[in-house]
Amino acid sequence: MSNFWKKINKPITALAPMDDVTDFVFREIIATIVKPDVLFTEFASADGLFSNGSEKVERKLLFSEIQKPIVAQIWGSNPENFKKAAKLIAELGFDGIDINMGCPDRSIMSKNSGAALINNKDLVGKLIQETRKGSSKLSLSVKTRLDMNPDLTKEWISFLLSQNIDTLIIHGRTAKAMSKGQADWEEIGKAVEIKNKINPEIILIGNGDIKNYKEVEEKHKNYGVDGVMIGRGIFNNPWVFEKSESVNERTKDEYIKLLVTHTKLFNDKWGKDKNFHEMKKFFKIYVKGFKGANILRQKLMQIKNYEEFCSVISSFRE
Ligand SMILES: Cc1cc2nc3c(=O)[nH]c(=O)nc-3n(C[C@H](O)[C@H](O)[C@H](O)COP(=O)(O)O)c2cc1C
């Protein structure tokens, strides 16, 4: 088995999985402008991959060569389907598979999945084992959160670090905290200490509230994490993985160009499969901070399709 994580220089950077956000198209955009070391898909239901309507789930697992190395994230609680999913994901050409053990959404937790797996050691042990059986060639990671009971986080992290995994990603919040408050990097630092004692070979990635590469370096230095995963920071700045601090502020033209590229690719790729309204959540990433941005954004929020988008943009450019 070749563990691609081990070949990357530290600090490793990764784009977080974000459902309905980090789809094929957005990943393609990020990989083209400033690419992180590793990309993750949105989470895909392991059960959904093997049931009616699997096309919708399989869409989450599309990728291109420039998005590699790429990790497919799955969620669920059925070990047999995890084995089948790992086999499929390896056949599709992914570099790694990640098990979601952190999603706080009620609909996921009620299925014994996501953050409901935290400290459910019997089931988690089986899920990891079966995923390994499904493919020996994929790197295997787990993405999780802190336990809602602070006394049990150490136990949970120690358990995961004793499992047959390559990489552990810790979002420094509990499921109850959802995305609120600040991520607890002290707890992530404690996890690094545990890892160094019991299984230093595992790659440990911290996650929560990181906004630029300077902060990636700081967390690497101050807490000893091997790398950092960034999610929402990409909304604030699509060039968030830029290493050089000397890059000037991006210009209006650069933002508009990226908006046009993203929207065109969305239309080309998903025109038949997704409603154009799904593109609208991305507009605020590109249309901000320049003269006329508010008015342009308001106009864009009212359009219904790609043709109307093109017409609004061409009159803005005139
Ligand atoms: C819109 C959205 C969708 C998300 N979807 C997923 C997901 O599918 N799988 C997952 O493990 N985490 C998911 N997350 C959590 C992020 O991966 C990340 O752990 C969290 O946002 C904290 O990192 P950040 O502060 O850098 O955003 C999602 C977060 C957001 C905002």
Image: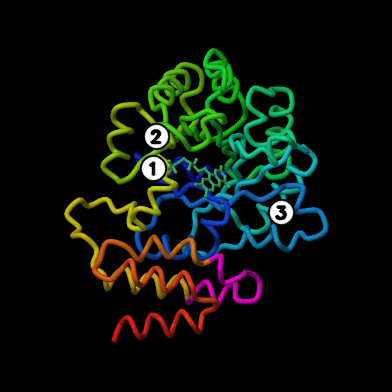
CA distance separating discs 3 and 1: 26 Å
Quadrant, the C terminus = bottom left
Q: Residues within 10 Å of mark 1 (few under 14, many from 20)?
A: many
Looking at the rendered structure, the secondary structure element under dot 2 is loop
Residue at the disc numbered 3: 88
Which mark, by number, is residue 12? Answer: 1
User: On the rendered structure, is 258 left or right of 74?
Assistant: left
Q: Is the CB atom of the residue marked by disc 2 within 8 angstroms of ligand 1's nearest atom?
A: no
Dot 1 or dot 2: first in sequence order is: 1
Name the residue type under label 2. Answer: Asp
CA distance separating discs 1 and 2: 6 Å
Note whether 158 is above or below 65 in the view shown.
above
Residue 268 is inside the magenta segment: yes
x, y percent for residue 303: 50, 76
- Residue placed at 50% from the left, 74% from the top? 265
Q: Marks 3 and 2: in contact by CB < 8 Å?
A: no
Q: Marks 2 and 1: in contact by CB < 8 Å?
A: yes
CA distance separating discs 2 and 3: 29 Å
Dot 2 or dot 3: first in sequence order is: 3
Residue at the disc numbered 2: 226
User: Range of the magenta residues?
Assistant: 264-278
